[in-house]
Image (cartoon, grey):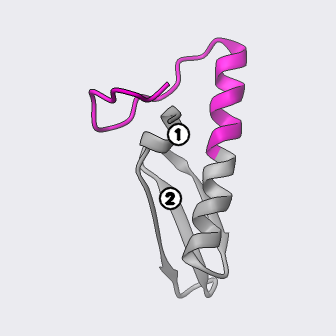
């Protein structure tokens, strides 16, 4: 399990753009859209993985999952 698996993701229908929008509580400015909730969530999780990898590579602190402690999440 990675730290991304411990983050809090949610998806819901958005009337304005007529699509599903996914959010991540630990990365509040990052969202993704999709034709289905599953697609929006998968797109967002991939984006969060990329952001976390970049943060690791640049030595930045990665956001801690909201449900601390998070045993098994690296």
Which residue is farthest top? 59
Q: Which residue is mark 2?
A: 23
Q: Which quadrant of the view contains residue 57? A: top right
Q: Residue at x 55, y 75 (%)?
A: 37
Left or right of 28, for residue 38: right
Position of residue 37 relative to residue 57, above or below, is: below
Residues under labels 1 and 2: Cα distance? 13 Å
Decide: few, some or many residues near mark 1? Use Cα within 10 Å; few <14, some 14-19, many ≥20: many
Q: Which quadrant of the view contains residue 26? A: top left
**Is 69 a magenta residue?**
yes
Q: Residue at x 54, y 64 (%)?
A: 22
Comparing labels 1 and 2, the label whose residue is closer to the camera: 1
Left or right of 2, for residue 49: right
Position of residue 32 relative to residue 39, above or below, is: above
Position of residue 26 relative to residue 23, above or below, is: above
Decide: few, some or many residues near mark 2? Use Cα within 10 Å; few <14, some 14-19, many ≥20: many
Q: Which residue is mark 1?
A: 4
User: Which span of residues is magenta-colored?
Assistant: 48-74
Rendered location of residue 39, percent (x, y): 65, 71
Rendered location of residue 36, percent (x, y): 61, 80
**Is 57 a magenta residue?**
yes
Left or right of 44, for residue 2: left
Of pointers 1 and 2, the one earlier in the residue sequence: 1
Position of residue 70 relative to residue 48, above or below, is: above
Near-viewer residue (17 or 71) = 71
């Amino acid at each position: 399990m990675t730290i991304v698996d411990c983050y809090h993701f949610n998806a819901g229908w958005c009337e304005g753009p007529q699509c599903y929008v996914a959010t991540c509580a630990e990365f509040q400015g990052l969202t993704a859209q999709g034709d289905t909730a599953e697609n929006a969530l998968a797109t967002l999780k991939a984006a969060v993985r990329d952001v976390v990898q970049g943060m690791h590579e640049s030595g930045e602190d990665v956001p801690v999952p909201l449900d601390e402690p998070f045993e098994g999440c690296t």
